[in-house]
Amino acid sequence: MERIAEKRLRANEVYSVLRRTYPDATVTLNYTNAFELLIATVLSAQTTDVRVNQVTQPLFSQYASPEKLANAKIADIERILFPLGFYHTKSRNIINLARQLLLSFNGEVPKTHDELVTLPGVGTKTANVVLGNFFDIPAITVDTHVGRLSRRLGFSTQKDPEKVRVDLEKLFENNKRTVLSHLLIAHGRAVCKAPTPLCTKNPSACTVYNFCPRNGIDKKKFEYAVLTLL
Ligand code: SF4
């Protein structure tokens, strides 16, 4: 059974290796301000960032502010969001979100989790993306990749994203939390895929193979892996 201090050490080694593997890992949604990041993140539920970027280009060029979006006709927004799926709900949500921003926050995106989650369509995941990436307030975002990798890497046994986040916060200091999400997402997309990670056929595909309990961490192997990093 791995003790918490050992797990913390291993987790931070995984972080260091992934940092070298994905030095440019960051948000893959396109945005130029907090309002755009908030809207893009709400739209990213159940779809890919690539698709979101395709629709936000026309969306933000025509509805560049909460005022413009709040006064939009829903049919016009639905036409733009159609390729995303769930476009009825998403269109309604972002118009209501813009209205709520004007009503409650003077058109400014709030800087706290508790305020952000009062907005339509905004949950903890979206709030943390905005806090961590726009306002530089450390926050772990647990999406499907982060949840899966956290379980495979033995950082958490939980399925509920909120519980996974709490487990990750026990392992990683504030200054690593926002980037950690990007690293796990990058590794999840490239190598540690669902349903089958590439390591099952090719161990060398994964740079954190020697730190992964899926392959059986033994003390010698871990010490060797740490030494090779020095
Ligand atoms: S060794 Fe396999 S399961 Fe573990 S992190 Fe790498 S790809 Fe994922």
Image (cartoon, rainbow, N blue to C red):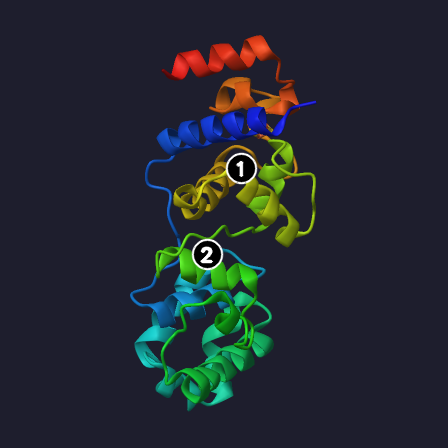
| Residue visible at 41% across and 44% down in the picture | 179
Please tell me how many numbered marks the rendered image carries: 2
Image quadrant, ligand 1: top right
Task: Name the amino acid, label 1.
Answer: Leu
**What residue sits right under mark 1 in the picture?**
171
**What residue sits right under mark 2 in the picture?**
49
- Is 208 positioned to the left or the right of 3 in the image? left
Q: Secondary structure at mark 1?
A: helix
Q: Is residue 52 above or below residue 220?
A: below
Task: Name the amino acid, label 2.
Answer: Asp
Q: Is residue 188 above or below residue 86?
A: above
Q: Which of label 1 and label 2 is nearer to you?
A: 1
Q: Secondary structure at mark 2?
A: helix
**Callout 2: 10 Å neighbours few (<14), some, many (20+)?**
some
Picture quadrant of residue 145: top right
- Is 55 positioned to the left or the right of 1 in the image? left
**Callout 1: 10 Å neighbours few (<14), some, many (20+)?**
some
- Is 178 positioned to the left or the right of 78 in the image? left
Picture quadrant of residue 54: bottom left
Q: Can residue 226 be seen in the rendering of this structure?
A: yes
Q: Position of residue 108 (x, y in %)?
A: 36, 78
Specify which label sits upstream in the sequence, 1 or 2.
2
In depth, the one of 31 and 77 nearer the eye is 31
Q: Quadrant of the N terminus?
A: top right
